[in-house]
Image (tube, rainbow, N blue to C red):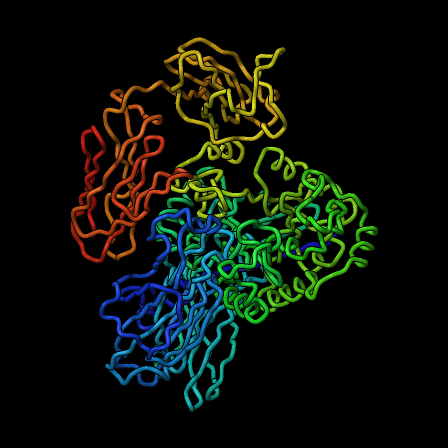
Amino acid sequence: MRVIQLTLLFAQALSGLASAESREQDFNFGWKFLLQADNEAYEGPLPRPDRSWRDVRLPHDWSVEHPFSEELEGCTGYLPGGVGWYQKHFKTPTNAASKRTYVLFDGVYNNATFWLNGVRLGENPYGYSPAYFDLTEHLAESGGENVLTVHVDHSRYADGRWYTGSGIYRNVRLITLNELHIPIWGTYLTTPQIADDEATVELETQVANTSDREATFTLSSRLVSAAGGVVAESSDQLRLAAGEQKAFRQTFTIAEPALWSPDSPSLYHAVTSLGQEGASVDEYTTPFGIRSLEFSADRGFLLNGEPTYVKGVCLHHDGGLVGAAVPKGVWRRRLSELKAGGVNAIRLAHNPFSQEFLDLCDEMGFLVQNEFFDEWDYAKDKRLNYHDRHDDRITRGYVEHFQEWAQSDLERTMLRDRNHPCVFQWSIGNEIEWTYLHLRYVTGFWKDPNDPQKSGAYWGSPPLFEPEELKKRYDAIEKGEHLMPETARKLAAWTRALDTTRPITINLIVPHVSHVNGVVDAVDIAGYSYRGVEFGWAKKHFPDAIVTINENPGTWEDWKHVLEWPGVFSQFMWTGIAYLGESHNQWPNKHWQGDMLNLAGFRNRGWDYFASVFVDDPHLSLGTEPLEGSKFRESETSAIPEAKDNSAYRWGDTNRHWNYEPGEKVLVDVCSNHDRVELFLNGRSLGVRSLSECPDRLFRWIVPFEPGTLTAKAGAGEAAMTRSLATTTEPTGLTVDCDKQELRADGYDVAHLVVQLHDQEGRPVKTENRLVTFEIEGDARLLGVDNGARDNVQDFQSSRLRTDQGRALMILQSNRQAGDVRVKITAEGLPPQSVSIAVR
């Protein structure tokens, strides 16, 4: 039986860098920005005159600042791209002599080129990988002015299958180092042994000597607990030749280690310093967590020795109204909601995310599948998915750079991310089989060479052939220039060269072919995409292969694959939160609807459903929808609603209100993990449903509407619980909920203001809407507004919008000036409200 034993101490490098001010400087403020009026190449001198350019602070996404337009492409959310220029003026530090100065960009989308004082530093085509550049040789004299210029060419704005954003949409840091220093991403920590009473820690530290003389120094490291106590330390006297860079290893033992897990995300800090002649010349801080991983074909996944189900969701990288430049506080709110719904894992779909996002996952306790690429040798169609069927310029994407840049992008991502406790898998690709056309014809389902989208009965059907026959068909079929198994082996080799402590996975959409052609052999875990129907076939023919789910709709039938198949340990539901884009020809629907949270981060009905499945605490919640138009009908033989087809047996985003026409037949669904639920209307029992009668764990009734109160009851005694929906009247006011009463005056902290219409009894009104206006008094920044509706194409960057379900969201961000901020909220025909926030 093949087993992967992974035991290590994972670390996150605080933005990849030390926290010491002497080493790192926040470089997000004081930028100038110009969006070109056209996409023509600029041929003038650099740096460019920028006095008339707009002042911006980073992270910045210019696409989300624009109105939605039906004339644009739905694949990227009906928002534009273009060509943008950024410039930052800064003075050379007076202590810059005998130092090295670097600038680190965590992400620029995309096709970015960088200059300092008109000298080209380099480029980075991939919008999702970090990149840094050495500025040392091009800086002005001490105290002189420098101009850093960044050119971003996102004129091919439909180059993604989802919203990408445009610009310097992640953090930027300026790093100043002595000639003897720890390079960027210069530490790597593992633990070869973990037990209850102690853990062995190995710290590998890269040290560079850029001077022209040999360096003698002290390498000192101490491991610090969350409480601030030093739990282990080590010090070594070392030498390094002029111009040399070398890795040094130190070994530690931590007694009674606090292990990292989603339930208890315990973090330590490794503080590493270089000393010469009694003075510190560099210090590098690495937060980390200790935990062990084990994967096997029969037992599945063990975290810290305990069998663990991965209850995951897939996420794209945008944050709704803020676009791709997502403040940390916006992600914190969204991740907190997922956590409350029982989610313990996130798949980064389908590209590396920001350093800040992984920092939060470390802190909050999420397992992360870190995915590198959505396409390799051949392109996917940005509008239609599968293989490329458009040849227009605006959809040309990363495939044009993959051969030259894939290794560099993968390695830079891994060096930044490989010490995070949250990252527990590397994924080298997503549904890549679609782009190698011959693979689908091997299956026997696709038969028409003139119509490669005609898939026969593929969806929901097990493989047609045994492995031997599939292999013969694969060997005999005509192939293209690039072969998927060869590329998979290449990517896996690059990954293992930098980290052997985590497994490599891949998301397979035609897994049975990948089992026979060598793709599965190249990785450690075969992750299936919507193909749980193949588990029986795989377990029979490849019993030693570790197989699980990397993507699926997240129905109860999907989760049963995890519960019933030995060794299958995960699901990653598509998708946890709504994301902009993937909406070709769907105007005004601008985004893909999330299963648990909508685009504004409000809970969908799917949040209730997953909480009833994934969370052990008792759960009970109500949803309603008109019977007409639903997937159910009245049964002639039973009071239980009858499904029109099997697709009805999954949750839907039903209403959370009890307002319909008198006598209208309403389908009521109840999410619960109780065995029995009873429904009442105005105190009258409408019957009891048992879980055994519910194929998808949803209790259902058909109820003729009458005004009043609909109540579900479950449990007995101290475990008894009720949930109700009441008929509401006209809105008479609005409630404003603000998640922060105080913000830090750091230019980053955010507050979410949620407005909800209510009636005279204070009940939320979800069937009427109003135009809401926000007025800000004080020094704060309006990031934007949204109501979460798919068809909402009102400008995000506005101070007013019409509610949906009587609800609206506004996000406020602090500036760097302390003071008091007051937000006044008005709605048509309703008394105004105000919220006060202290900025400190």
Furthest residue to the bottom? 213
Location of residue 435 in the rendering, given as x and y in whole percent from the top left corner: 64, 56
Residue that appears at 52% across and 47% down? 314
Residue in the foreground of this view, choosing between 297 and 682: 682
Relative to 219, say whether 223 is above or below.
Answer: above
Residue 373 at x, y percent in the picture:
56, 59
Judged left or right of residue 523, residue 46 is left
Image coordinates for residue 313, horizontal then vertical, percent: 52, 44
Is 517 on the left or on the right of 829, as rendered? right
Residue sitting at x 42%, y 45%: 335
Position in image of residue 751 (x %, y %): 28, 46
- The residue nearer to you, when weighing 200 against 757, is 757
Any part of residue 758 in sight: yes
| In the depicted structure, whether residue 17 falls above or below residue 640 | below
Q: How many marks?
A: 0
Q: Is residue 658 depicted above or below 520 in this figure?
A: above
Whether 9 is drawn above or below 797: the answer is below
- 642 to the left or right of 242: right
* Residue 194 in sight from this viewpoint: no
Residue 456 in which image quadrant: top right
